[in-house]
Image (cartoon, rainbow, N blue to C red):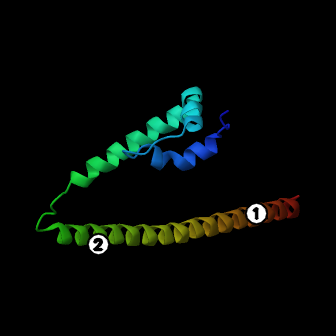
Amino acid sequence: MTVAVRCSEVAERMPLLLEDGVDVDASTRDHIEACLRCQAELVRYRRMLRGLRSLRDAYLEPGPDAVSQTLAALWEAGERQAVRSALSGRRLAYAGAVGGLAVAAGSAAAVAVVLTRSRHRTLT
């Protein structure tokens, strides 16, 4: 009689399942053969291991000016951020000035209406 294995138990054993020379017990093997979820997880795990193994052999030699290029890129990014910050401060001041002018224009229009009405009343 085999003991039922759950998906969570198979997930914990996944690294051991793919090692060479490790025997998988019958209940785990039966579960994987019957469970599509665990089969898919096993395929994803194998794919991940292949990708990691391929990275082991890949080595990129940095160019002689890699440090200076990195520092220049960081400097440019900092400059762009400083310009954005300055522009956003200017935009806020500009919006405040426009708003102030709008309030002043509205007040002037209100005063003009009042003066016009008061003149109209005094003439009649």
Residue 118, how many percent across, how many down? 84, 64
Position of residue 119 in the picture relative to residue 43 (left or right): right
Residue 83 figure quarter: bottom left
Relative to the observer, which residue lies in front, 110 or 29?
A: 29
| Residue found 19% across the figure and 57% down from its top | 59
Residue 92, how many percent across, how many down? 55, 69
Residue 35 figure quarter: top right
> What is the crowding at mark 2: few (fewer than 14 residues within 10 Å), some, or many (at least 20)?
few
Q: Amino acid at mark 2?
A: Trp
Relative to the observer, which residue lies in front, 116 or 26?
A: 26
> What is the crowding at mark 1: few (fewer than 14 residues within 10 Å), some, or many (at least 20)?
few
> If the image is split into quadrants, where does the N terminus sit?
top right
Find numbered disc 1 in the image and state the secondary structure of the residue it sits on: helix
Residue 39, how many percent across, how many down? 52, 32
Relative to the observer, which residue lies in front, 59 or 77?
A: 59
Residue lying at the far front in this picture: please name it. 1
Who comes first in sequence, dot 1 or dot 2? 2
Relative to 124, say whether 14 is above or below: above
What residue does disc 2 label? Answer: 75
Evaluate if marks 1 and 2 touch, with contact meaning CB atoms under 8 Å apart.
Answer: no
What residue does disc 1 label? Answer: 110
Residue 89, how many percent across, how many down? 50, 72
Position of residue 28 in the picture relative to residue 109 (left or right): left
Relative to 91, say whether 25 is above or below: above
| Residue found 40% across the figure and 69% down from its top | 81
| Residue found 33% across the figure and 50% down from its top | 52
Q: Amino acid at mark 1?
A: Ala
| Residue found 15% across the figure and 61% down from its top | 61
Find numbered disc 2 in the image and state the secondary structure of the residue it sits on: helix
Mark 1 and mark 2: Cα distance apart in space = 52 Å
